[in-house]
Amino acid sequence: MAQNSVTVRELVNNTRLKIVAGKEYLDRPITTSDISRPGLEMTGYFNYYAPERVQLLGITETSFSTRMQHDELLMVYRKMANAKTPVFVVSTNLPISDELKQAASEAHIPILTTSLTSSRILSNMTYYLGDQLAPRESVHGVLIDVHGMGVLITGDAGIGKTEAALELIQQGKARLVADDRVDIHQEDEERLIGEPSEVLRNMMEVRGVGIIDVQQVYGAVSVRSHASIMINIHLSNGRIGEENFDRLGNENDSLEILGVKLKRMVVPVTPGRNTASVIDAAAVKFRTTNMGFDALETLEKRMTAEISKNEKIDAKEK
């Protein structure tokens, strides 16, 4: 489920910000990752003011304010200090005017400062808020890091998702990110980040064995806190021949999560088949394909060349 807000206190704890005033108001919510640079508002133009955003004041806004009269500046800051306004942030260790302190105090809004430039602190805050406020979705499955990329394993309950992931972890080919429940959020238009729920972090449930703390059993190198999901491998208990499985790996099947499409491979699980090895091979194939090497294309070229060769031989014999 998406997190609807973060508090100003959380923003302070996760970015290079210091509290100047309003320490008692740090529980005010921030509901958007967009940051406002109130340049036009300093001139008194509030037609498109977005009060729910963090209000960032830099050198331009501060230098402009020094030309304003006390009453005019106080009126502007009072308009900016909306009931929805979460916080004022002043960059570059710039001086904070008495008018801003008064307006913020009246509206119970904290004021923060930083030594970073406006562009740098804006980037830091946008990255943190974007990550925390991004839409989230929980998926039933296992997420592991294989060769540096996130592999989301899905399938019916009891089909062996956890056992296959555990085998890869034991072999040192994978690291656990999340078992049973994968919390996913969108980092950008093309990238999904998966992580475990806090309760299940580093834990795996192996049928017949119970709960395993992977970090304690296999060491810190066997787990990751999050991973960028690159591919979905879906385990199916259907039998080859009864279902239309992709034999050549040329199908463009996909799984859509939060509007982002992931490459999806459906792998049949049958007795005697090493599912962990198949998952490893699928991950390696996906990586090499992205690097420009396509085994299917190579096979097709060889077959075309062989057919052409045979046709020439047949033509000579005629």
Image: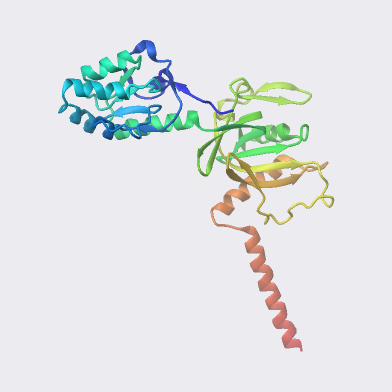
Residue 316 lies, with reference to residue 127, above or below; the image says below
**Which of the 4 quarters of the picture holds residue 222?**
top right
Q: Is residue 185 left or right of residue 299?
A: left
Can you say whether 282 is above or below 223 in the image? below
- Closest to the observer, 197 or 166: 197
Left or right of 148 in this view: 70: left
Compare residues 36 and 156 and report the one nearer the observer: 36
Quadrant of the frame with the N terminus: top right
Q: As rendered, which of 314 and 72 lies closer to the eye?
A: 72
Which residue is at the front of the view, 12 or 168? 12
The percent position of residue 236, horizontal first and vertical second, equals 77, 42
| Residue at x 64% of width, y 38% of height | 152
Residue 21 in view, yes or no: no
User: Given the current orientation, which residue lies at the most extreme top position?
Assistant: 24
Q: Tell me the quarter of the picture where residue 64 sits.
A: top left
Colour scheme: rainbow
User: At 33% from the left edge and 27% from the top edge, which residue is drawn?
Assistant: 55
| Residue at 37 percent of width and 32 percent of height | 35
The total of numbered circles placed on residues is: 0
Q: x and y percent of residue 234 in the render?
A: 71, 42
Residue 193 drawn above or below residue 267: above
Residue 314 visible in rendering: yes
Percent position (x, y) of residue 291?
Answer: 54, 53
Residue 56 percent across, percent down from the top left: 31, 28
Residue at the image position 21 percent from the left and 20 percent from the top? 97
